[in-house]
Image: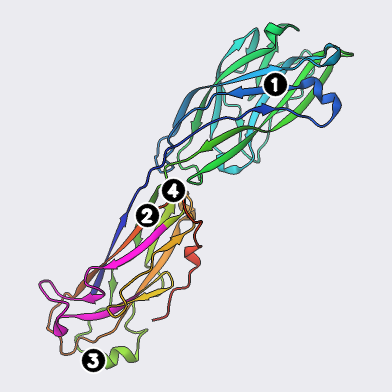
Amino acid sequence: MVIEMKISKLIAAAAAFLGAAVLLAQPAEAQVRRCLITAQSSPAVANYDPFNPTALSINSVAITFTRTNTAGGAHPDTIDMYIKAQTSAANGMQMIPVSVVGSGSATGLNQNIFYDTPGVYPNITVPLGTTPVPGVLRWDFSGNNIASNTFTVTFNLVLPANLDLNASSNINFDIEYGCNGTGGGPQFSERATAPNAFTLSVKVLSALQATYVGANLDFGEVGDKTTADVLLAPSTFSTPPTGNNIRVLSSGPYKVEMTSQNAYRLTFPGGNPATAVQRLSYKALFLGQTVSNAAPTFTAVTCARAGVPAAQADLLPIRATLLEGGDGKQLSPDYKDVITVTVSPLAVGPVGVDCPAVVLPSP
């Protein structure tokens, strides 16, 4: 006696938006104000599918940096910088400066200057006369004049496959920088952090992967069992409590629904589940609910996001219990039903419950 499992999945796509916000270095200590740098960028637009095995490249993201000359003429002459995120969700991405336009000179183009969180970060203290360390972008200003105050860096961004991002994410980045300079007193060398300097606003494709993991829900041979036999030993005539699961990976919350082809009745090929001698009734146990022919309505459940890495997959156990014996039924080696579990991604909506933690009902 077999219940075949069928999984259907719906993919709902949402537009993706990638953008950058204003960077403003606002150090708390007065002396750091000599390294005051602001930055602005135009938004870049992209769609990100976390299940695509190919990395996503976003080219020509321009960020314009402007130094502020403070009272007394103090100004940065050289600045080193790198970028990091405030969350490990962005780990693995790259931000590669490919060109700089301005009155000055750049060192460190065509290398990744993004660092994972937490990580080992480069030294960006900039004493006079030093060369930049690997993994940072250096800009040498050409002088202390209005024309040389601004420079524009063009970046290529690379988002690797399988980033574990929410279906709608705002990722804040900090820019770490150091500088040296002159004016308004002795030469200085400082470093600072610009918190929330760059915001990556991403609406990834709200998508999921769903599969059935396990064997068919099989009750075995029950032709010599009466209904009384079956009802007296529900655990004996149930599928195993573990090992049969709906496996879900998702970038956002998702909805789970379940239906039965024969309204939770097994029948043989060509049989009629409405005819008593041609059916075997059973009940299905899933996500805290028990459904049967007497109560066939499964209430849809909204689950919290599972995540994208395979190690975070939600495993939702499913079980079935026979309600009738085969004694007196029409003989057939093959009584079946098909259960369809539909798993649909939700681009927006409630957060949902932790579905793997939902208790499986008893037989």
Query: Do the numbered discs 2 and 1 sit on residues whose CB atoms are within 8 Å?
Result: no
Identify the mark nearer the N-term, 3 or 1.
1
Q: Amino acid at mark 2?
A: Ser
Point out residue 228 in the picture as x, y percentages from the top left corner.
28, 93
Say which element carries label 1.
strand
Q: Position of residue 333 (x, y in %)?
A: 15, 77
Label 2 crowd bin: few (<14), some (14–19), many (20+), radius 10 Å: many
Spatial CA span between label 1 and label 4: 40 Å
Badge 3 crowding class, 10 Å Cα cut-off, few under 14, some 14 to 19, many 20 or more, is some
Give me the C-alpha separation between circle 3 and circle 2.
40 Å
Give the residue number, with chain letter if any, for mark 3.
226
What residue did someone put label 4 on? Answer: 347
Secondary structure found at label 3:
loop
Q: CA distance from mark 4 to mark 3?
A: 49 Å
Residue highlighted by disc 1: 80
Tell me which amino acid carries mark 3.
Thr
Q: CA distance from mark 2 to mark 1?
A: 47 Å
| Earlier sequence position, callout 3 versus callout 2 | 3
Q: Which quadrant, please, contains the C terminus?
A: bottom left
45 with respect to 123 (left or right): left
**Amino acid carrying mark 1 in the image:** Asp
Q: Alpha-carbon distance for marks 3 and 1?
A: 81 Å
Q: Which residue is mark 2?
A: 344
